[in-house]
Image: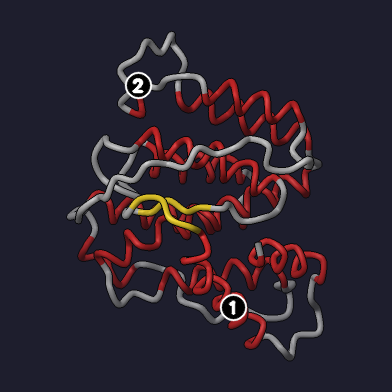
Amino acid sequence: MTFISCEVEKYSLILSPEIPNSLRLVIERIQGYSYAELYEEKDIQGISLEDSLITVFDAIEKEKNSLDISYCYFFMAIVMGIAVQPTIKTYLRRETITGNIFQYLFQNWIYPQDNYQPNLNVSFRDYQNYWGQYQALDEAVDVFENMLQVLESVKPREAILNILDDCFQGYAIFPGSQGRRELFDWWLLDVVPSVFCGRLPKNIHTLKGVDKMTKHISKIRNYFWKVVENNQSQVNIDLEKQNLLLSFLAR
């Protein structure tokens, strides 16, 4: 697998008036640090990457109620899944589990679960012979398993931290040390403000580098419409969540 290094666009923090100054100031401060975990050689002055991630999450949670916080983490999980899916496809070219997981997440997000059991295979068990052979694959699969935890867990922040650890310090998006800082800056300056406002980021970072989100989102939208088509007979639907998800995927 070849990682294609790509210069990250110089993002502007003036993305939306919906971003409060408190969050903007935290992003600016965190972006100014250097991190040993990202293979940077500057004096890090005892600042850890995990501490900075927690600081960002604290800033998000300060500005939102508990329900909106869960929405924000859900959207962030979807974005990181989009970034990681190409890694899994590189090793498991014919797999359908990642698509099923996206559909499962959308289905559980929109429809109450007391009337039916989702008929989707969301387990990578059939590929267990591959485990332990490729670090990138193992960590990419771990990302998707933690995406399920973001939806189902009472502690979604921990699941998001696990996802980010697999991406920033692991090989879930790409191997090696090159480009770690660019990956982190993409998340901090594009993903965080975007999901805070309930929309997709402008760009997506995959194993091939940074690209426009518009080139990747069609497949994800198709997963959403499959869920809608398969649940047309459902009477109970959370219209607010459906509209939030539609708005998120439309951006």
Assign a secondary structure to mark 1: loop
Q: In the drawing, does residue 171 fall left or right of residue 153? A: left
**Residue 157, position in %: x, y?**
60, 41
Assign a secondary structure to mark 2: helix
Location of residue 149 by image quarter: bottom right
Location of residue 208 by image quarter: bottom left
- The residue shown at (53%, 55%) is 79
Name the quarter where the N terminus is drawn. Answer: bottom left
Location of residue 103 by image quarter: bottom right
Q: Amino acid at mark 1?
A: Pro
**Residue 86, position in %: x, y?**
35, 62
Q: Label 1, label 2: how many angstroms apart (C-alpha)?
A: 43 Å
| Relative depth, front residue between 115 and 142 | 142
- The residue shown at (39%, 44%) is 167
First in residue order: circle 1 vs circle 2: 2
Q: Amino acid at mark 2?
A: Ala
Q: Tell me if label 1 and label 2 are in contact, CB under 8 Å.
A: no
Name the quarter where the C terminus is drawn. Answer: bottom right
Residue hosting label 1 = 118
Residue hosting label 2 = 36
With respect to residue 59, does 9 lie above or below? below
Q: In the drawing, does residue 64 fall left or right of residue 212? A: right
